[in-house]
Amino acid sequence: MTTAGIVAEYNPFHTGHAYQIAETKRALGEDCAVVAVMSGNWVQQADCAVADKWTRARLALMGGVDLVLEVPTVWATSSAEGFARGAVALLEAAGVVDVLSFGSECGDVKALERVAECLDSEEYRARLAPLLQQGLSFPTARQRAAAQCIGQAVLPLVHPNNNLGIEYIRALNALGSSIRPMTVLRQGAGHNAVFARVGEGTDGSPSARDAMPRFVSATQIRRDLLEGDWDRAEPYLLPGARQVLEGGVLNPDGLSRVERAILARVRTMTAEEWAALPDSGAAEGLPWRLERAGHRCASLEEFFQSARSKRYTASRLHRLVLRAYLGITREDIPARPPYLRVLGLNGRGRALLREMKGRSGVPMVTKPAHAKALDGPGQALFRIEARCTDLYDLCLEQIPAPGREWRENPVVLA
């Protein structure tokens, strides 16, 4: 039996995710097992998840995943490269994954492999350095350097799923992994795409609802949930998902409830504290810029306006601020996964877990109590995760008692 691995946020799980799983099984065989490594309560777009990780794990199991493992927050909130390195390392550590399946805008794994090879070449690095010295942002410099190596036909790295797919392949290569990459052509709305509300048009064209594509982005669904429009979101959720989301810990309001706590953090940080964060840009002088912005701002919007420049993308700055709030430093990121945390499983997932125990050299955390038996690095990472969950819970309308990370067991479906 083939086992496919999928890296995901499932924020929340929707019909596009179900399509990827179905296409993966169509390519690999209907008896293919699926292991998803999923971001926890914090996601790569520097935001809190729309629902907590146990609720989202339940939806993933309902959608065809057999085993859900957690991508710890230290990797889940990283850049595309760091996110991919951490997630792929988890799939490799599981010891049972044969194929890594991911969506992409191009649908051509060979083309993605060519770009991945380019980005790991000495020629690319030699071409990238002078472009960065010109003050170009990293994404712009990266695209131009790759085009100089491969030619103008290089895939657009600004397409987020292409970019992530390339980083997954680079991570597999760096690990010398035997896991094979495969890609599913992304269908429907683009990443982060949102559509006009019904009734917004005035030109007599069909309603926005009639014009909605077969699949929509998770961003669209989160927007609908924020506005309380379940009727608009529900067609793109799994049958029964609305009840799960309404009955779980739902947070469509994002970071709005903790904005002042984040503001307090950035207004009191020193350049040295900024420099201790991952991807801090210390060599480029960014920490000093962030300290100055923090000392001048009366709101987070003002902070980002003051800190922004041509060189530093908004997404990079938002990730830095989120990691500052969560207290994640470079020293907190392990060189390799110290454990595998199970968030959910079904019957087949239970069989996979038994197989993993014989193949993986990494401890399995299937209950919070197991974390107490981990070694030093494992316990340290789990404590960070517990803190991140407590900080996530401050984003909720009804704040739970602290320590939920130590109380919640994996979701189990038949």
Image (cartoon, rainbow, N blue to C red):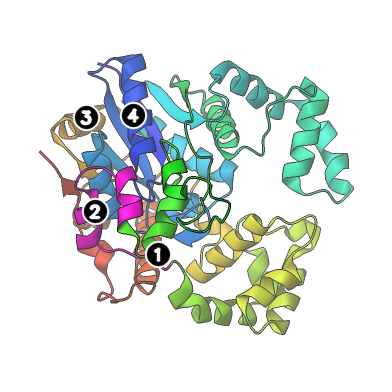
Q: Which residue is mark 4?
A: 21
Q: Which residue is mark 3?
A: 352
Q: For mark 3, does the 10 Å Cα neighbourhood hold few (<14), some (14 to 19), or many (20 or more) residues? A: many
| Quarter of the rendering containing residue 114 | top right
Q: Which residue is mark 1?
A: 226
In this rendering, which labeled residue sits more in front, label 4 or label 1?
1
Q: CA distance from mark 2 to mark 1?
A: 14 Å
First reached walking from the N terminus: tag 2 or tag 1 = 1
Element at label 1: helix
Q: Which residue is mark 2?
A: 242
Side of 343 relative to 209 (left or right): left
What's the magenta region?
A: 231-253
The vertical placement of 199 against 396, above or below, is above
For the point 39% across and 36% down, the residue is 16
Disc 1 marks a residue whose amino acid type is Leu
> Quarter of the image containing the N terminus?
top left
Q: CA distance from mark 2 to mark 3?
A: 29 Å
In this rendering, which labeled residue sits more in front, label 3 or label 4?
4
Rendering coords of residue 393 (x, y %): 34, 70
Q: For mark 1, does the 10 Å Cα neighbourhood hold few (<14), some (14 to 19), or many (20 or more) residues? A: some
Q: CA distance from mark 2 to mark 4?
A: 20 Å
| Quarter of the rendering containing residue 289 | bottom right
Element at label 2: helix
Side of 320 relative to 325 (left or right): right
Disc 3 marks a residue whose amino acid type is Leu
Q: For mark 2, does the 10 Å Cα neighbourhood hold few (<14), some (14 to 19), or many (20 or more) residues? A: some
Q: CA distance from mark 3 to mark 1?
A: 37 Å
In this rendering, which labeled residue sits more in front, label 2 or label 4?
2
The vertical placement of 383 against 352, above or below, is below
Disc 2 marks a residue whose amino acid type is Arg
